Amino acid sequence: MSRTGNEKDLKGRYGSFCLLVLGFVSILTLNAFILWGSTSFFYPSDAWNSMETSFSDACSIANILTFFVIGLAAFLLPAVFQRKLFRIGSFLLVVAFALLFLPYTGRFESPALLVATGILSGAGSACLLVTWEQIFSEQSPIGIHRVILVSSILTIIPYLMILLVPDGQVLLVLSFVVLPLCIGTLYGSMRLPADEPLRDPNPPQHGKRYRTALEGTWVALPCIMAFGLISPLIGAITLDSSVSAAVPTLFAQSGNAAAVGILFLIWRKLKTYPTIPQVFVISLPVLSIALILVPFFGQEYRYVVLFIGAIAFTLVSILVMVSCIDIAEDSGTSLVVIYCLFAGVLYLSRSIGELIAGGMTSSGYSQSVQFIAIAFFLVYIVSMVGFIAFHSISRGQGAMDRTEKPDRVPANDIRTRCEHLAREYHLSSREAEVLEMLARGRSVPAIAEKLYLSENTIRSHAKRLYVALHVHSKQELIDLVESTDWPTRGQ
């Protein structure tokens, strides 16, 4: 390729990256106000602000239900959800913001209006987030990791700029700047050329694939629930009622930047991201100890605890988006179903945590008692999740010990089976190498590092292997290797 061609390709990739970052920053900024914000940003009137729980509760419930409804519908009617969620989500958000202007006319002063706008906003936000996840799944993993990390850092800039706007004008900025930018960039991102082909929305034997996917990742779900429960509890007991509504969201944005820095350092050192259970095992015990020490320190220390909690929740939120793509790819399942399940569990547990937090703050107990109670609650959650995981692993190992599986492939004989498949399907030597490593369960980044190749090259080899071997996922490839007839050592 000529130098001019290389420059055009570089400019095209840079332009695509900027478009994806700008679009994702827009949806994150919008969510910071409609999901985690307050109607005090929209209306200067105290009368309307007294009814803000009507908006926030309706928005949260609609957001959670929409995730589960989309996931269920994508499982039952997968063909319906090819690119249609963008139109639905955009329409719902446009109508919601149009309704938010009605109180300024002075003729529609009813909590029912805020409930309606909350429902539309929550449902529309969920639809657009799922659409973004679909777009990410079609791009190269390294590029998308960068998009998510850079966007999480940059979101704090527009958020701080909007906070400088007078409260009564925030709605104007969101309606005529952020929302059009969000919809426009998402539409443009959908038209970008896909680095990865869209997965089969209705793969054969999809029920078995989902069971296989959950069997390998179910431990992450109780960890996600724990993070969702604890996050609002920490915010409720570390911030008193006199604190501005912007403070919790500001801490969340600061936590985004810190979490991205942590993930970047881990990636530079290990060439991979931590798993959700790993973040759980490290962060929640730290939070437990920090909460126990809170009564012995001043208000500044409480902000430190809140900041740590924001980092932990942000880490999980980012890892959910990244992990769901990997899970869907490895198991050959629908990304929409997997993401909606994980995101729905995260936001549902967060809402439950908000209810518990509301009950604790209105209980009349001193803050010292609340801190200690939540700290022990954290310890209890860590112990229970650890016990469940250990019990499941032990039971699975015991079942394997009691049951003979003569067709199970010994680790040192995987190469023999892969060589047999390579000869039968006329695979190249490089494809045979990739086949063996995939059969051993290695990830794409690990294979790329081992063979000194790029991840995109390994993915290209993997796709050709799937076509040649007539499989649709990494799990099916492993099953094929295990079921391949081969001469035993004694023959």
Image (tube, helix red, strand yellow):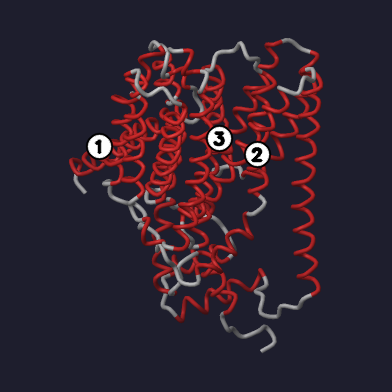
Counting the numbered discs, the total is 3
* Numbered disc 1: secondary structure: helix
Tell me the quarter of the picture where residue 247 sits. Answer: top right
**Residue placed at 50% from the left, 77% from the top?**
421
**Residue placed at 51% from the left, 52% from the top?**
326
Find the distance from the CA under tag 1 to the CA under tag 3: 27 Å
Amino acid type, label 2: Val
Which residue is tagged 1?
Answer: 11
Above or below: residue 146 compared with residue 345:
above
Q: Are marks 3 and 2 in contact (CB under 8 Å)?
A: no
- Which mark is first along the chain, 3 or 1? 1
**Residue placed at 51% from the left, 17% from the top?**
246
x and y, in percent, of residue 122 in the image: 45, 37
Q: Is residue 461 visible?
A: no
- Which mark is first along the chain, 2 or 3? 3
Amino acid type, label 1: Lys
**Residue placed at 53% from the left, 22% from the top?**
249
Which residue is tagged 2?
Answer: 279
* Numbered disc 3: secondary structure: helix
Q: Nearer the viewer, residue 42 or 164?
A: 42
- Label 2, residues with CA under 10 Å away: few <14, some 14-19, many ≥20: some
Labels 3, 2: front one: 2
Which residue is tagged 3?
Answer: 263
Amino acid type, label 3: Leu
Find the distance from the CA under tag 3 to the CA under tag 2: 11 Å
Q: Nearer the viewer, residue 216 or 51?
A: 51
